[in-house]
Every structure is written in structure tokens, then in C-alpha cells.
Image (spheres, coloured by chain):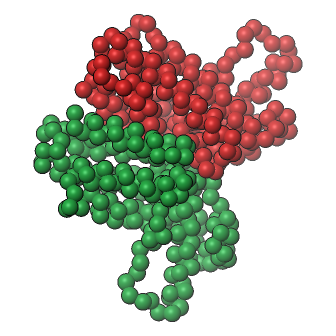
Chain colours: A green, B red
Amino acid sequence: METSIVARRRGRPPKELAGFSETRDTLLRAGVAALTEKGFSATGIDEILRSVNVPKGSFYHYFGSKESFGAELIDIYAAYFARKLDRILTDPTRTPLERLRDFTADAEAGMKRYQFRRGCLVGNLGQEMNALPQTYRKKLRDVFDDWQARTERCLLEARETGQIPANKNCKALAEFFWIGWEGAVLRAKLDGGPKPLRVFADGFFSVLTS
Amino acid sequence: METSIVARRRGRPPKELAGFSETRDTLLRAGVAALTEKGFSATGIDEILRSVNVPKGSFYHYFGSKESFGAELIDIYAAYFARKLDRILTDPTRTPLERLRDFTADAEAGMKRYQFRRGCLVGNLGQEMNALPQTYRKKLRDVFDDWQARTERCLLEARETGQIPANKNCKALAEFFWIGWEGAVLRAKLDGGPKPLRVFADGFFSVLTS
């Protein structure tokens, strides 16, 4: 999770607006960090506020409640991740299967940067969904659908260019990838190392080309 | 999660011991239900006590702390699951690959029984590991190692009997299965339905036999 998770606004905002958005963005960044590391239930608002030295009043001024804060965190994480997938999975200098490998390598590097303590915000919240506001369920499912659709497009390109056999079902493979990949991220956090990501990626690529 | 999760003691216990173990077992059963559904962080001891109408003093008398209660829940869940895997994966009336299919079908039936609200206790706690007592990490990893070893033995039998090709790496396949399967259970909870379990199982079986 880079600090670029909160998309930069274009141009220079007016002075007081700048102050406004800086505090807000600081809270969002701290929220994403906490949710990728520990999930929603284990994250206390007080602890986030202390970590970035922001008073409680500001939090409620900007977000109203922990529930709407969490909803916004899902949205910005989804937007950040969509930009990342777009950059990697449509890179014209790489073949479609190289792009998928690039994605798994990027994910491993991203987890390594935080000693495999931070995983996927959407996977974490999906796991604890039965303890979360029910409004999150559709949001989280939509995010997976989006990631799967992007991955399917890359696989279709691989099939068109003959990198994978013509009889492969790219939609099913994209679903299979994301179902298993979230398991791999979970296990990499538990292990504190990259092996589960590699075992799953290697298995998946052998499915693609067999 | 059946009520048989807490293994029955042999014979009839003395009267007061019976009362002792009944309350204790009731708490363990409620704890397993809560942890499979919501995980550790989102589960409050007060809420468990209310759900089974047991006073707080009894809880601390039997378990001392939430941490040691959680540790015992991991142990009894692991023992319950080992019995289940043993029963299914060594069933002499079924071929090795039928046994693996039986396991995925049993898991689907088990999730359906609770409307796909309850998942895997070990997967849930693995996901939220960074918010848990660090002593849980080794316990959870050991449980996955045990499940993988049991699955590997079944795959080795499948290879010996020619159900899967001789060049397959059964250890890597067993790891691949459990990495991905936990992702499938997570997604089945999020979806509230069996499709992710089936997509992953079908993909896995196509890997085995290709």
C-alpha cells in the first residue's frame, strides 16, 4: 500500500480547502493501513486518531461514523487497485501472461514492503463480512467482479494471441484466480513470507498453459 | 459446524463433574460458532455469555482469559477437523479422488447448513492474525500443515493408483489446494452461496488430472 492510495486532486486547492483535505486524506491513509493489516472489527477509531494526531471531532466532521468511513475506505482502495490493475494488465510492452506475472510479482513486492503484515483490504473485510454493516456486502462483491473482469480481459488477449489454449474458459479462470489469490494473501500474512503467493501463482500458471 | 465439535468424553462423568463440563462445553461450542462466523476480534465474551446464559465468573473460572479461550477453540476445532478429514480422506470404500470430492461436498453441505454464514475458524483467525495474540500464529500454521499433510497422503494414493499422472508433485498440490480453498470459503461467505467452492474445486480437479 503506497501513500499514493489517496488519488491526488488536480491543481492546487485553496488554502483552507488544502488544510481540510490534508487532514481528511491523512485519516483515509491511516484507515487503509489499519484495514489492510487488521481488518475492520479490530480497528478502533481512537487508535487511528492517535496514530495521526487528529482530534475525534475532525473524524466525525469528515466521516460521520465508522460505518461511512469504512465505506469510503473500500471505495478508495477499489479505485487505487483498479488503477494498478489497469496499469499492469494492459501494459502494451508485455505479453498478456507476462502482465499477470507482473501483477503477482508487484503484489509480492507490495506485501514485502510491509513485512507481509498488510494484505488485501477487500479480502479482510470479505472474511469478516458477518460482523460488518450489511451495506458493505454488495460493495465488496462488486470490487471482486471488477477485478475478475479486468483479469478476464487479459486472459482473453492471451487466448487470442495463442499464449493459452483456445478451449480455456477465461471467465472461469479469472474467477478461479481471484478466489485462490485471496487465500494466498491470507496465508502469506499468516506465514509472514511470500511462499503461498508463489505456490498459488505457479499452480495457476500451470493450469493456464496445460 | 455440528454440535459434535466438542468430543464426547467416554462413559458417564460424576454428577458435579458433569455440570462442570457441560457449562464448559457449552461455552466452547458457542465460541466455535462465533469464531467461524465473525472471527476473534468481532466476538465479545459478554455476547457469548449472554447467548448461552452463563455468568461471567464461570467463563473466567474455566478459561482465565479471552486469549486462552481462543487458544482452546483453535485446538478443539483442529481436533474436530482432523477427525473429519481422517474419516473422509481415508474412506476405503471410495477412490482417493472421490474422497477429495467428498470433502468439498461435505464442506459445501456444512456451510449450507448455516446459510453460508459460518466459514473456517482457522481461515478467519489467519486473516486477522495481526490483531491476535502472537502465540496463535504457530498454532494456526501447524493446523494448515496438518491438513496439507493429510491431503498430500490422499493425493499420493491417487498417484499410486494411477488416478493422477505420475509426474505430479503431491506436496505442492496439497499446499495449492489449501491456499485456494480458504479463499473459496471466504468468497462463499461473502456471496452467501456455494459457487466459489465449486469454481475452485472444479479448477483444482482439472489441475490434478491434466
Q: Residue A46 at what x, y percent from top left?
A: 68, 66
Q: Residue B24 at what x, y percent from top left?
A: 77, 28
In which quadrant of the rendered view does residue B83 lie? top right
At a point 42% along the width and 44% down the height, the residue shown is A197
At a point 31% along the width and 50% down the height, the residue shown is A101
When the figure is inspected, residue B33 is found, relative to residue A141, above or below; the finding is: above
When the figure is inspected, residue B173 is found, relative to residue A162, above or below; the finding is: above
Viewer-nearest residue: B205 or B43: B205
Q: Is residue B3 among what the camera can see? A: no
At a point 35% along the width and 42% down the height, the residue shown is A201
Task: Indicate left or right for A187 with A8 as reference.
Answer: right
Q: Is residue B22 among what the camera can see? A: yes
In which quadrant of the rendered view does residue B22 lie? top right
When the figure is inspected, residue B124 is found, relative to residue B168, above or below; the finding is: below
Figure quadrant of the C terminus of chain A = top left
Q: Residue A32 at what x, y percent from top left?
A: 52, 63
Q: Residue A196 at what x, y percent from top left?
A: 45, 41
Viewer-nearest residue: A7 or A158: A158
At a point 28% along the width and 36% down the height, the residue shown is A206
